[in-house]
Image: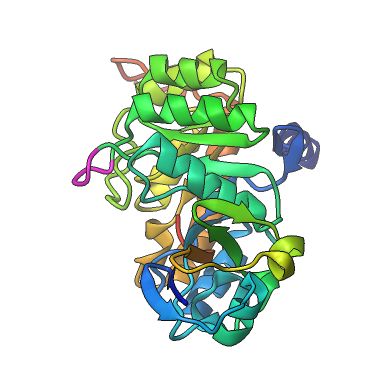
Amino acid sequence: MDILVNGESRRVPAPATLMDLLGQLGLDPRTVVVELNREIVRRPRLGETQLADGDAVELVHFVGGG
Amino acid sequence: MTNAVITTEFALDAGFAIAGRSFRSRLMVGTGKYRSNMDMVRAIEASGAEIVTVAVRRVDLDRTREEGVLYHLSPDQFFLLANTAGCYTADEAIRYARLAREAGFNEFVKLEVIGDRETLLPDTDGLLTAARELVREGFKVLAYTNDDLVTALRLEDAGCAAVMPLASPIGSGLGLLNPYSIRTIKARLSVPVVVDAGVGTASDACLTMEQGVDGILMNTALAEAQDPVAMAWAMRRAVEAGRAAYLAGRMPRREVAVPSSPERGMLT
């Protein structure tokens, strides 16, 4: 299926959860905050939240700022 | 001056509290724009700051961990204050604040809603809208605003935990442009007033603290100094000196000279 991750399209094998996606990207779920179609998905739910074709995922973290 | 007096002064300045949380250092610092992460960490340590601001941004999927600020800065050592920098609407700022809270450190947010790309001055309408919503959602809102008293009063009414008027535009280093406004805001508000943005060098920080405000937040003044660690050292002392001078109470200004030495006893 095709999804958008941080604004870029990506093809991921279905089925996949958000946790699977983080694993594929090599990201530690404790270091990112995940938004799926503009709704925050809390960490305990990452493993049970299935991705669907056309989903938009945002992965954010803290960077330097003032 | 006796040691007893000095002790009293420091006892008077036992720090301050935002939304019931106490802080000893009145200097808060940002983490942006440093030439290196090592410069950033050493400067922040030299500043003595407890509150450290961070921004929320997309993870760079090509080169992850390197750029996350928490890779360099321990969240156990500092109080992380996430900002909504770069947001131009209330909705956008609310979205960023929620993401920041989800990171799980605290419910504080430095709310910025920018209204103009050239000056980065705040959109006060959007700021008030976002502040009301975030307060309703349980956030402790520290609102970055201009040096306008009426907006500051409205932000306080909206339930903000602190109001953060600017000294001058973000990253400008122009210093404290309107001491009167800042003094008036501090005099009229009950919540803490922390001046945010515009301080360029130590004298700016000292003059700002002499207006009686609760603290200062700065970033570029340290990050763009030729030696950020030395500037952080200077800023820390400038903030302490400005606070102490405010507490000491300055002498009145006069339009005439008054001699410091006795007029009596001069030779004839």
Q: Give the percent coordinates (x, y) of residue B140.
A: 64, 35
In the rendered view, does A5 fall on the left or right side of B191? left
Q: Residue at x 35, y 38 (%)?
A: B89
Residue sitting at x 36%, y 51%? B86
State the image coordinates of residue A23 (x, y, percent, origin top left): 63, 83
The boundaries of the magenta stretch are: B116-120
Residue B142, above or below B100: above
| The C terminus of chain B - image quarter | top left
Nearer the observer, A26 or B169 = A26
Residue B147 can be seen in this image: no
User: Which quarter of the picture shows residue B150?
Assistant: top left
* Furthest-left residue in this view: B118
Q: Where residue B112 sits: x, y (%)?
A: 42, 41
Question: Which quadrant would residue B240 be assigned to in this image?
Answer: top right
Instruction: Please name the colour scheme applied to the rendered image.
Output: rainbow
Q: Is B117 included in the stretch rendered in magenta? A: yes
- Could you tell me residue B75's position as x and y percent? 70, 64
